[in-house]
Image: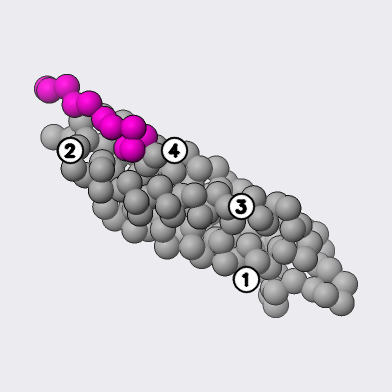
Amino acid sequence: MGVHSRSTWSSWIGFAAIILIITGFFTAIEGIVALFRNQYYILSSSGLLVFDMTAWGWIHLIVGVCAVLAGLSLFTGAAWARVVAVLLVSFNAVSQLAFMAAHPIWTTIVIALDILVIWAVVVHGGVVRDEGTGIIGERN
């Protein structure tokens, strides 16, 4: 068992993992609210970009759970977790546009967090691989 030092840049992947887990929970909660309180997101004539609240709720619940799992997997430094993370937060950022009319500040914050996760995973994901360790410890 050797001691590996991690660079500051690999800490960005840990940060991205934590933010991905948090945004995954937020997305899952948005999905649950859409399933059980259909009228919560409905607006008047301007409306949301959502045509079926039940389908939208299920999609966001599933994406949120997958995002939490991908965030947990990012701690291992696995390449597949980085790819899945980028795909999920990309979808989440685009889907947040549906909330722009109802919650502009919240939408902007979530999209900014999604972009930060994409940046950290894409730019600094290879650092974890090059160091030969996962975020939570040494790989054998």
**Disc 1 to disc 2, how far (Cα)?**
41 Å
Q: Earlier in the sequence, mark 4 or mark 3?
A: 4
Q: Is residue 106 magenta?
A: no
* Label 2: which secondary element: loop
- Image quadrant assignment for residue 101: bottom right
Mark 2 nearby-residue class (10 Å; few <14, some 14–19, many ≥20): some
Residue indicated by mark 1? 55
> In the rendered image, is residue 38 in sight?
no
Instruction: Please state which of residues 74 and 69 is positioned toward the viewer in this rendering.
Output: 74
Give the mark nearer the N terminus: 2 vs 4.
Answer: 4
Of labels 4 and 1, the one closer to you: 4
What span is colored magenta in the figure? 1-11
Could you tell me if residue 128 is visible in this image? yes
- Please report contact status of discs 4 and 1: CB closer than 8 Å, yes or no: no
Alpha-carbon neighbours of circle 1 within 10 Å: few (<14), some, or many (≥20)? some
Alpha-carbon span between mark 3 and mark 1: 21 Å
Q: What amino acid is found at the position of numbered circle 2 in the picture?
A: Gly
Q: In this figure, which residue is indicated by the disc labeled 3? A: 110
Whether 140 is drawn above or below 82: the answer is above
Q: Nearer the viewer, mark 3 or mark 1?
A: 3
Give me the residue at 69% from left, 73% from top.
Answer: 50
Asked if the residues shown at circle 3 and circle 2 are in contact, with their CB atoms under 8 angstroms apart, the answer is no
Q: Earlier in the sequence, mark 4 or mark 1?
A: 4
Secondary element at tag 3: helix
The residue identified by callout 2 is 132
At 58% from the left and 52% from the top, the residue drawn is 112
Between the residue at mark 2 and the residue at mark 4, the CA separation in whole angstroms equals: 18 Å
The residue that label 4 is drawn on is 15
